[in-house]
Amino acid sequence: MKGKTLMFVCRELGSEDGIKDREDIVLKTLDCAGDLTVFEVLKALEEGFQQVFVVGCKKGTCKSRIGNLRAEKRMATVRRYLGKWAEGYRLEMVYLNKEKGQTLLDQILKA
Amino acid sequence: MVITELKPIEKIWQNIADFRKVLVLGCRGCSGICSTGGDREVKLLVSALNLIAENEGKNFIALGQTLIRQCDPVALKVLPEFLKEVEAVVSLACGVGVNLIADLYPDLKVYPGTDTLFIGAHVGFGVWEEKCRACGDCFIDKTAGLCPIARCPKGLLNGPCGGSQTERCEVNPEIPCVWYEIIIRLEKRGELASLDEIIGPKDWRLTFGEGPRKRQREDLTF
Ligand code: SF4
Ligand code: SF4
């Protein structure tokens, strides 16, 4: 991954395993991926993050039912506001299950 | 309300790329209500434009303000206060707002940030539908309150076309045949007889006018 990365991660998916030691990655825990706002993502890009991941629970398992789907739509809105300039950034929505034996970071990068 | 949609950002940028300071001007009226140009969307567009400027290596700053409305000179009175060193304004109101700003501030470069789509209603979360074409001579007292000018693709005034077979419109099966709905409703209201009266050709001068239409209320003007 190149440049600074910001990861918004749903609290349900667990700890900062593997992330807290990485200087190039900042983690922000959300009570639900659906709490993400379009503005927060744009602000992060303005602050110099090149990559923003939003990590929510697998479809059908969100505790707020559609918080994860909302997060995906908000990432799409970020892309709409940036038009062709969105291509200069990595903007990813990742759906995960909480899994044992793997760090959260490994799971995110593999997804 | 007047339904608007944000223009593609590339088109917005094209108009303002050579300025150094631009005001994004929102409207808390219809445009804010339909989530195109209220406080939230102003904040997003300002942020996006500043990011784009950075990507393009431009010495540029976008600022944001939102007015209660842009279709009223009283609400626009404060605009000059926000224009210090501003070289251009991107309005997130409907076309009415952009026109009025252009009328009132002829030296100001104002550009539309939205496309104005239609007069419509909010019919579901994030969904708006056209309901009226502002024809200037409303006759929906005869059609159970449903407008065939806005809601029938053929704009038929005196009953359905031959293609109305399955309660859906033959031109656009995504929508119900509004004439089917009108007849069902008139029947329920005991007003089917209102269709006996032929609605004559409409006077489209009331719709398209000779130049912009105008309404003046004598009781309010001096
Ligand atoms: S008849 Fe004319 S004024 Fe009435 S709802 Fe239809 S378009 Fe609007
Ligand atoms: S099917 Fe109904 S709504 Fe469609 S064009 Fe014919 S009359 Fe109009």
Image (tube, rainbow, N blue to C red):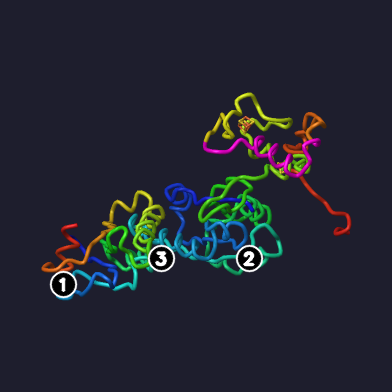
Residue under numbered circle 3: A39
Give whichever of discs 3 and 1 has the lower sequence position. Answer: 1
How much space separates mark 2 and mark 1, taking CA atoms? 46 Å
Q: Which of the chains bears the disc numbered 3?
A: A
Residue indicated by mark 1? A22
Image quadrant assignment for residue A12: bottom left
Label 1: element kind: loop
**In terms of secondary structure, what is the magenta stretch mainly?**
helix
What residue is rendered at 26% in x and 67% in y?
A7
Labels 2 and 3 in the same subunit: no
The magenta-colored residue range is B174-194
Q: Are marks 2 and 3 in contact (CB under 8 Å)?
A: no
Label 2, on which residue? Answer: B68
Q: Position of residue B116 (x, y in %)?
A: 58, 47
Q: Secondary structure at mark 2?
A: loop
Chain name for mark 2: B
Label 2 to label 3: alpha-carbon separation: 22 Å
Mark 3 lies on a secondary structure that is helix
Label 2: how many residues lie within 10 Å, few (<14), some (14-19) or many (20+)?
some
Classify mark 1 as within 8 Å of ligand 2 or not, answering yes or no.
no
Q: What kind of residue is marked 3?
A: Phe
Residue drawn at 67 percent across, 65 percent down: B75
